[in-house]
Image (cartoon, coloured by chain):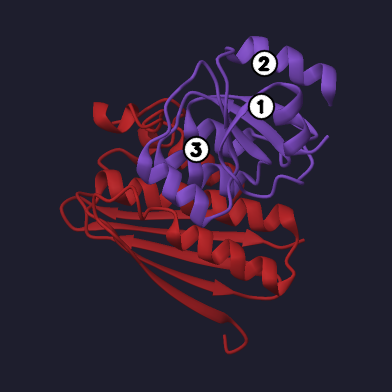
Amino acid sequence: MTVKELAERLKLTILTEGDLDREVIDCYIGDLLSWVMGRAPEDSAWLTVMGNINSIAVATLADVSCIVLVEHAALDEEARQKAELHDVTILQTDDNSFELAIKINELI
Amino acid sequence: MSNALHLHYEVPSDDFTRAGEASGSVKKRLKSLGYNTDAIRRVAIAMYEAEINMVIHADGGFCDVDIYPDRVEVLLSDKGPGIPDVEKAMQEGYSTAPDNVRSLGFGAGMGLPNIKKYTDEMRIETTIGVGTNLYLTVNVK
C-alpha cells in the first residue's frame, strides 16, 4: 500500500507531500524521539504527537515512509518547512494511535 | 589513511533546527557511495544523537568524519562542561537534560546508550570544564 492510498483510504489529511508513491509496509508508534529513531522500522508509518522540527530529522534518519500526527496534533511551521525541504510526507488524523494502528493493520 | 574520504561539520550551539544537518549530510554521502543501508542507518542515528547531545549540553562543537571502505570513523568534539559521571550517563534513562528539551521529545536518557548500541566502537574522553571528545566507529559489513 502506498502512502497516497493509505491517506485516501483512512481519510488522513496531507500536510506535507514527500514521495506519496512510497510503500508503507509497517507501522510504529512513539513520541520519544531517541527511542523512535533507534527502533522505527524502515518504510513504516510513524504515528506520533510530536510535530516539531526534530521529528522531521528522526523521520529522515529512520527512513520511515511517512509521519502521521494523531489526535490532531499540531505541526510547527518550521517543521513544515523542513519537511518540505527534505521531502517528508506528514499526514494528520483525529484518531488516536491505537485506533489508527488498528485500521492500518487491516490495510498493510 | 590516504584512502579515507574526510568530512568536517560545525555543530551549532543551542539550535535544534540545525542539529541533524551533519548526520543527514553523511547519510546522503554514504548512500551515494553505495554503503549498505544498515551501516548507513547506524552511523546516522549515532551521529544525530551525538549532535543533539552537543546542542543540549555543550554549546555545539565540531564533527569530523572519515569514510573508509570497511568502516566509518567519527569524532565529535565539544568544549562543553564535560561529563561528570560517564558510567551513569551510559545508563538508559539517566538524563540531565532540562525540561524544555524533554518537551521536544528528547532527554529520555537514551542518547549515549543508543550511540553505543549502534556503533562497533565507542570511546569517550571527557574533562570537566574543558570538553568532551566522542570517538565512534561503525564497521561496514
Q: Amino acid at mark 2?
A: Leu
Q: Position of residue A6 (x, y in %)?
A: 75, 30
Chain B: give its colour.
Answer: red
Which residue in the protein does label 3 denote?
A: B113
- Residue A23, above or below B88: below
Chain A: give its colour.
Answer: purple
The quadrant of the rendering that contains the C terminus of chain B is: bottom right
Q: Position of residue A66 (x, y in %)?
A: 64, 38
What residue occupies the far bottom of the structure in this picture? B2
The answer to whether dots 1 and 2 both sit on one chain is: yes
- Mark 2 packing: few (<14 Cα in 10 Å), some, or many (20+)? some
Which residue in the protein does label 2 denote?
A: A100
| Element carrying mark 2 | helix
In front: label 3 or label 2:
2
Which residue in the protein does label 1 denote?
A: A28
The reply to whether residue B120 is in sight is no
Chain of the residue under the numbered disc 1 shown in the image? A
Q: Amino acid at mark 1?
A: Tyr
Quarter of image, res A78: top left
Query: What is the distance, in whole Å, between disc 1 and disc 2 at their CAs?
Result: 11 Å
In front: label 3 or label 1:
1
| Element carrying mark 3 | helix
